[in-house]
Image (tube, rainbow, N blue to C red):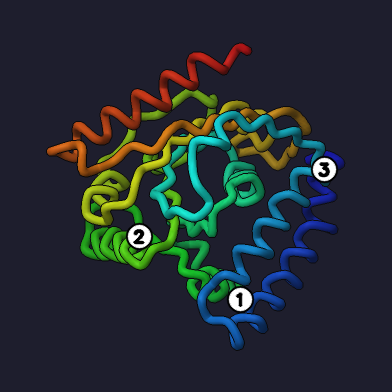
Amino acid sequence: MNFRTLIFLFILIPITFFGILLILLLSLFNPTGNSFYTIAAWWGRLSARLFGISIEVIGQENYSPDQHYLVISNHAGMADIPLLLGIMKLNLRFMAKEELGKIPLFGRALRQAGYVMIKRGQNRDALNSLVDATKVLKNGHSLHIFPEGTRSATGELLPFKRGAFRVAMKGGAPVLPVTIIGSHLITPKKSLRINKGTIKVIIDKPVLPSSFSTIEELMGTCSGVITTNFNRYRNN
């Protein structure tokens, strides 16, 4: 635990709580989930400023805010979600682990915003979550999935799983590969410390699922894009 941890506990958590209450109130008048995005994007930018996190974004020109995408990225730290909410110019929903959906008020706000709760594993509930994710794309909304399925403790890339690319093939939306570098140093796994630092986010060009005949081919191409950018920019 350090000074930034205290900022999180005594400043950011109360702000988050009141933001959730505001979101739930606004959802009574606007059930589209758009109010959640507006507040969450502001919250993401505020989090970066509070913790002294500098974000270098490469490739903002590679996507259109007027289009919807399946956004995929590697996952190395708890800072990944707020930073993506803050920098991506998309009305972005996330696929989140089911435990978050069980948090009072917060879970309700996530579900009303169109976030997809997923239970890990290969059971029926997990498959139903992939169906729900596909519906988000077919309804014209952008969705983010971490295809590794868990955070990397070291910042190195982990093997991708097929679920995200099954959603891409069935949902039909372009896949937007995003590489995150350095977030594991901001919020180390199994630690309460929050460190300041710089995170690089590389947004590559969209990949069209219709150009591939199998899930494995699509997964291999997207994994290759993220791996290439990770190796290219990690030491720059």
In primary-sequence order, the first of circles 3 and 1 is 3
Mark 1 secondary-structure assignment: loop
Could you give the CA–CA distance between mark 2 and mark 1, rounded to whole angstroms?
25 Å
Residue, x 41% and y 50% (percent of image)? 69
Compare residues 91 and 8 and report the one nearer the observer. Answer: 91
Side of 17 where 69 appears, left or right: left
Q: CA distance from mark 3 to mark 1?
A: 25 Å
The three-letter code of the residue at mark 1 reads: Leu
In contact (CB < 8 Å): disc 3 and disc 1: no
On screen, residue 176 versus residue 128, left or right, reads right
Residue at image location 32% in from the left, 46% down from the top: 164
Relative vertical location of residue 130 with respect to residue 199 in this rendering, above or below: below
> Which label sits on residue 204?
none
Pointer 2 local density, CA inside 10 Å: few below 14, some 14–19, many at least 20: many
> Label 3 sits on what residue type?
Arg
Q: From the image, tell me which residue sits under label 1.
A: 105
Question: Which image quadrant: the N terminus?
Answer: top right
Q: Position of residue 127 (x, y in %)?
A: 24, 60
Look at the picture and state if 47 lies above or below 22.
above
> In x, y percent, where is residue 98?
43, 62
Q: With respect to residue 37, does 234 lie above or below? A: above
In the picture of the structure, the residue carrying the numbered disc 3 is 4
Q: Amino acid at mark 2?
A: Leu
Label 2, secondary structure: give it: helix
Pick whichever, 125 or 57, lies toward us. 57
Is the residue marked by circle 3 packed among few (<14), some (14-19), or many (20+) residues within 10 Å?
Answer: some
Q: Badge 1, how many Cα within 10 Å: few under 14, some, many 20+?
A: some
Circle 2 is placed at which residue position? 137
State the image coordinates of residue 154 (x, y, percent, origin top left): 54, 25
